[in-house]
Image (tube, helix red, strand yellow):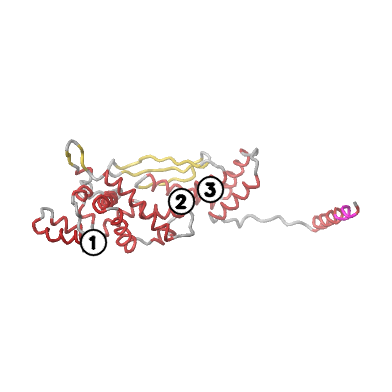
């Protein structure tokens, strides 16, 4: 306990918000110096209030906390994987700070019990807890500065609640893989999303993954991102299992790009993509040459060599 925490602790018995101070101390490991941003952090827009003509809720703090959290987690991931590429680092950070992960973290530390919201009992699509957790990081930044944010995230979140190796290697970004495959083959990849059922507070989305205008995958989820991931996964599965369909796409694309300057480079991209997606190529075999063809090629090579020496 530092000196400021000690002063706060002494004043607690006569403090108006002493129970709130104690609750945050239990979660954070330190006492807030200014309780106001923490009060705002737990205030969902459904429970907001007006102050000097302005609507007060945790959305602005959520914006700030999102930026701070991204920077802190980005630094941790950067140091954890010194030899990995930018794309790997980005995906790992995204897996850690995505709403589902932050929802879980908020519940693990007991922060969800402090949040004031009419949507607290909402079901699947409620990101109230995760959004409020970002607002909490924003409140810590305003109250104690960036250093305290780093210590809070590193000690409490990353050390105990997040498996960074699982976040790095355990999840596949199907949408990114499908887009990368399309870029390598110069094939257009498009995602369409629409709200199919549910209401404004708890919508369900339906997405389509299109390859060269053909719907190759459909998915449903509680957010556009989730439904698009599901659609991309289905499209990737079709590409890996329906060889005839995949080859027809590649052949059609080669026909559209006959004027390309580097067709050999395009072929290399196909090989890399097939390796990356673990396609089953067992049905593709080399056509064996018969005895007459082998003898004819050998005689031709010998003749060509003899001519070269005579000249």
Q: What element carries label 2?
A: helix
State the residue position of label 3: 181
State the residue position of label 2: 174
How many circles with numbers are drawn on the protein? 3
**In screen coordinates, is 194 left or right of 185?**
left
Q: Most extreme residue toward the front, as rendered?
A: 3
Nearest to the eye among marks 1 and 2: give it.
1
Residue 111 against residue 208 in the figure, above or below: below
Where's the N terminus, which quadrant? bottom left
Decide which of tag 3 and tag 2 comes sooner along the chain. Answer: 2
Q: How far apart are marks 1 and 3 (CA)?
A: 46 Å
Q: Is mark 1 on a helix, strand or loop?
A: loop
**In screen coordinates, is 247 left or right of 56?**
right
Q: Distance between the residues labelled 1 and 2?
A: 38 Å
Q: Is mark 3 on a helix, strand or loop?
A: helix
Q: Where is residue 87 in the image (x, y as percent from the top left)?
A: 47, 52
Taking depth in this image into account, of 76 and 298 the one nearest to the observer is 76
**In screen coordinates, is 139 left or right of 279?**
left
State the residue position of label 1: 29
Magenta span of residues? 305-309
Q: Position of residue 135 (x, y in %)?
A: 27, 49
| Residue in the picture at 62% in, 50% down | 268
């Amino acid at each position: 306990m530092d000196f400021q925490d000690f002063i706060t602790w002494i004043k607690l018995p006569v403090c108006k918000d002493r129970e709130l101070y104690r609750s945050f101390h239990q979660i954070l490991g330190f006492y807030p110096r200014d309780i106001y941003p923490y009060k705002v952090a737990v205030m969902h827009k459904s429970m907001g209030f007006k102050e000097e003509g302005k609507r007060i809720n945790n959305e602005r703090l959520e914006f700030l906390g999102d930026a701070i959290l991204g920077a802190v987690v980005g630094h941790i991931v950067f140091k954890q994987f010194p030899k990995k590429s930018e794309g790997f680092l980005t995906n790992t950070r995204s897996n850690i700070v995505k709403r589902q992960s932050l929802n879980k973290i908020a519940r693990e530390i007991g922060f969800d019990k402090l949040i004031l919201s009419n949507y607290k009992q909402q079901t699947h699509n409620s990101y109230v807890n995760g959004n409020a957790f970002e607002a909490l990081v924003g409140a810590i930044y305003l109250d104690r500065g960036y250093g305290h944010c780093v210590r809070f995230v590193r000690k409490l979140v990353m050390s105990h609640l997040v498996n960074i190796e699982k976040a790095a290697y355990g999840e596949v970004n199907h949408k990114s893989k499908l887009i990368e495959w399309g870029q390598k083959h110069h094939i257009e990849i498009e995602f369409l999303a629409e709200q199919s059922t549910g209401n404004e507070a708890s919508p369900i989305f339906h997405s389509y993954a299109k390859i060269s205008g053909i719907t190759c995958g459909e998915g449903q989820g509680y957010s556009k991102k989730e439904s698009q991931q599901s659609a991309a996964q289905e499209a990737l599965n079709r590409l890996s299992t329906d060889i005839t369909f995949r080859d027809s796409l590649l052949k059609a694309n080669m026909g559209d790009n006959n004027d390309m300057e580097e067709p050999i480079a395009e072929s290399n991209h196909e090989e890399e993509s097939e390796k990356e997606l673990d396609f089953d190529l067992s049905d593709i075999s080399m056509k064996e040459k018969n005895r007459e063809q082998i003898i004819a090629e050998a005689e031709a090579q010998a003749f060509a060599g003899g001519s070269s020496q005579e000249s």
